[in-house]
Amino acid sequence: MVLTTCIQKLSRQQVVLCIALLALSTSASADVARQKMPNVLLITSEDHGPHLSCYGDPNVRTPQLDRLASQGVRFANAYVTYSVCSPSRGSILTGLYAHQNGQIGLATHKFAMFRKWPNIPSLLKKAGYRTGIIGKLHVNPASAFPFDFKALSGSNFNDRPMSKFADLAGKFVRASDKPFFLMVNYPDAHFPLLKQQHGLPTLPMTAKDIKQMLPEVGVDSPRLRQHAADYYNCLMRLDSGIGFLLKQLDESGKAGDTLVIYLSDHGAQFSRGKTTSYEGGLRVPMIVRWPKRIKAGLVREELVSSIDILPTILEATGVKAPRNLPGRSLLSLGRGEKSVWRRYLFSGKAGTTAFWTFPQRTIRDERYKLILNLTQDRPCPTAIAYENHWGTFFVAGCTEAEIAAAPPLVRRAYAVWHRPPEIELYDLRTDPHEMKNLAGETSLTKVKQRLLARLRRWQRETSDPFANRELLAKYLAETARVSKKYGGSQSSYRRDREFRWKYLDYLAPRTNSKVPRSKR
């Protein structure tokens, strides 16, 4: 009534001006709302480190990922929390370390999260987002992740239809004007290493094209170079697939409003890579693009982790984060700000299956890296598997003869991997591929003590159950018992419908507790 009276007293020109200002204000408010709810495209690939041309690898050209990096920020020192698929993906989705959320082994071997933790799709769905996933999830229970759209949910290890991934993504992106979260999971470069499929790559590499064998492997032979060639063929096919995907996003008209995050789930399945706590297993490529909000062509050297993905997405979307997450948003780095960043980076593993149990905890700072082997009284089972090619996934492992032909420094590194001492210490500045264990060097005693003390503190802060010797012993006994009962088989207990890991009870945090407390 009062508003009507006021308007009646205004001149016609004043009314027109008010209406224009109101429309402008409404439009600005809508723009702000859109800015607070961007689309999110999370792209993951399998089983490869930063072996891309934008990371300086001399063997391969990856123009699509190079282009993505030129449009956003490339993180030069990016790591995952675990060098095996399910635990790594569990960390990406929940923002928690594997020992916090419970996914400490492969989902196909019935390892699972302790409970349904808040995660990227569940949090964004509550905020009004459409959620979708293309490719495998590989985290249990799948019901914890409320995706509205699912496609190509199999592993796709033997069929990699890159154009189909992109076409399905394009349909999802165009299906509605509501903001979306889409996770696209590519199977390359998982074994088998496919030389060419569906015409990709157009010009496959051969062994003679390899300029340098993967340096973290340390061993060279014509056989290994052929595996490396096919590994790079997988990466070139992946690069083409991501190009198809980003073209769909561009053609939808939504690229300018979409935060794109790309990373690999862990390192390559070569010796001293996947399943290990070495750089070859944990260091990955990570690229983030967000037009007009992240600087283009930026390279950041800070230590970043896959636990930072969830906080990054939540800050970008304006969605409230769960308390006590161990990671932090990467957006300040992407904006080029000088931030007080983390000094230490952590990772850990328990193994992959019952038979491959070998718990480790790892810490690194800007220069040094320390690996704490929690069961140093036994040989590392995956080191033996790589050497003896136990199963088709280990055929690119270095044989005993190939290791014997390597330089002395490399042979000693393989001996440490096969039967590690309690502590390994490496100077990543002078020895980036971790060939010389310096744990016994008296000149580095203070460095070792500092890193070990900080690692122990991290274990307390994140409620690491393996910091408790009794719980560790109980878990080792359980995995040994399962291996013995099922004859060491890697598949028989998977077929047992009644099988359930007991660690889900005795390692789990109290049911009335929040996310385990953690400091950066």
Image (spheres, rainbow, N blue to C red):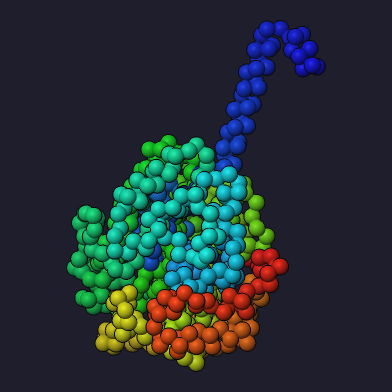
Within the image, what quadrant is residue 391 found in?
bottom left
Q: Is residue 360 left or right of residue 487?
A: right
Residue at image point 54% right, 88% down? 477
Residue at image point 52% right, 45% down? 130
Residue at image point 59% right, 63% down? 116
Within the image, what quadrant is residue 430 found in?
bottom left
Q: Nearer the viewer, residue 283 or 167?
A: 167
* Image x and y of residue 78, in percent: 48, 63
Q: Nearer the viewer, residue 514 or 309?
A: 514
Q: Nearer the viewer, residue 440 or 216?
A: 216
Query: Where's the C terminus, which quadrant?
Result: bottom right
Query: On screen, 303 above or below 409?
Result: above
* Image x and y of residue 259, in percent: 49, 47
Query: Where's the N terminus, which quadrant?
Result: top right
Q: Nearer the viewer, residue 511 or 383?
A: 511
Q: Residue furthest front?
A: 498
The answer to whether residue 437 of the structure is visible from this angle is no
Q: Is residue 478 left or right of residue 322?
A: left
The answer to whether residue 384 of the structure is visible from this angle is yes
Q: Residue furthest right?
A: 2
Within the image, what quadrant is residue 184 found in?
bottom left
Q: Is residue 270 left or right of residue 512?
A: left
* Image x and y of residue 240, in percent: 30, 52
* Image x and y of residue 473, in percent: 58, 88
Residue at image point 47% right, 74% down? 497
Q: Residue furthest bottom?
A: 377
> For the image shown, how many numbered marks are present on the structure?
0
